[in-house]
């Protein structure tokens, strides 16, 4: 099937189309579906979503992860009182350099995803942590009690961290990694997102 030409569309239409693709891929990565029994889905629905995810990963992009990374960096640097430029740079280094290291480790363990596909996946998996950072910004502005705000912030980031780790490790570990080696592939992923979550918590101090 030949895809329709986009040469005649307006700039606004192109931007909106790309944003829809980014949102769709963020949803697919953030809500992984490994099997029907684990997710409560029917087998045809599970297969459909798995096939849809593989298609989207095959047609990878770096614009979406870059937007997520940039949004998170700007959010954290805006609230950081001590070193906003350091926080901004640190988020970029953790996501992109850390993502490359995690991908190299996964490939040595048998993961069949190419480098940029894996970085694309990991970048989109940062979305829950970005949502968590936005919620922390709301708690910071709306909650008067510092103790309650700190508690809400920690709980929010822990939930977002678990979501990001689950989404990314599930998808990476399901692409060619043997069952006995899955923990070796998942641990660096968890470490990557733990570092990112720690930066988020420190930015609000």
Image (tube, grey):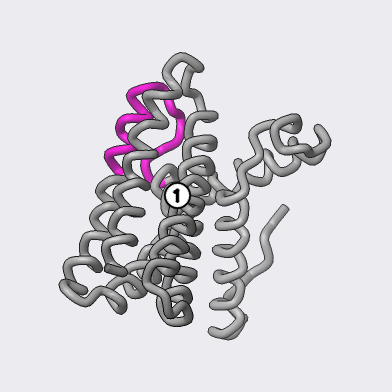
Q: Is residue 61 visible?
A: no
What residue is at 30 percent from the left and 79 percent from the top? 78
Q: Which of 128 and 69 is in front in this view?
A: 128
Q: Is residue 16 above or below residue 32?
A: below
Q: Give the range drawn in magenta.
A: 100-116
What residue is at 42 percent from the left and 24 percent from the top? 183
Image position, residue 130 (x, y; %) = 44, 63
Q: Which of 62 and 142 is in front in this view?
A: 142
Task: Answer left or right for 92 relative to 45.
Answer: left
What residue is at 27 percent from the left and 68 percent from the top? 205
Q: In this view, does 199 lie above or below 176?
A: below
Image position, residue 200 (x, y; %) = 33, 61
- For label 1, the residue is 161
Q: Is 146 one of the magenta-colored residues?
A: no
What residue is at 54 percent from the left and 46 percent from the top? 57
Q: Which of 34 and 160 is in front in this view?
A: 160
Q: In this view, does 54 lie above or below 67?
A: above
Query: Magenta segment, principal secondary structure?
Result: helix
Task: Answer left or right for 195 relative to 61.
Answer: left
Q: What element carries label 1?
A: helix
Q: Can residue 133 be seen in this view?
A: yes
Task: Answer left or right for 54 relative to 38.
Answer: left
């Amino acid at each position: 099937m030949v895809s329709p030409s986009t040469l005649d569309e307006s700039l606004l239409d192109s931007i909106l189309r790309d944003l829809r693709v980014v949102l769709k891929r963020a949803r697919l990565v953030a809500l992984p579906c490994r099997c029907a029994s684990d997710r409560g889905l029917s087998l045809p629905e599970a297969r459909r979503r798995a096939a849809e995810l593989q298609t989207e990963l095959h047609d990878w992009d770096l614009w979406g992860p870059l937007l997520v990374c940039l949004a998170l960096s700007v959010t954290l640097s805006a609230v950081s009182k001590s070193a906003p430029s350091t926080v901004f740079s640190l988020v970029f280094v953790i996501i992109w350099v850390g993502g490359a290291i995690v991908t190299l480790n996964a490939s040595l363990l048998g993961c069949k995803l190419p480098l940029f596909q894996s970085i694309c996946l990991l970048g989109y998996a940062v979305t829950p942590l970005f949502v968590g950072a936005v919620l922390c910004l709301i708690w910071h502005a709306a909650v008067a009690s510092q103790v309650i705000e700190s508690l809400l912030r920690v709980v929010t980031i822990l939930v977002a961290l678990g979501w990001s780790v689950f989404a990314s490790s599930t998808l990476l570990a399901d692409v060619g990694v043997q069952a006995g080696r899955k923990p070796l592939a998942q641990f660096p992923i968890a470490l990557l997102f733990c570092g990112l979550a720690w930066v988020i918590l420190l930015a609000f101090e």
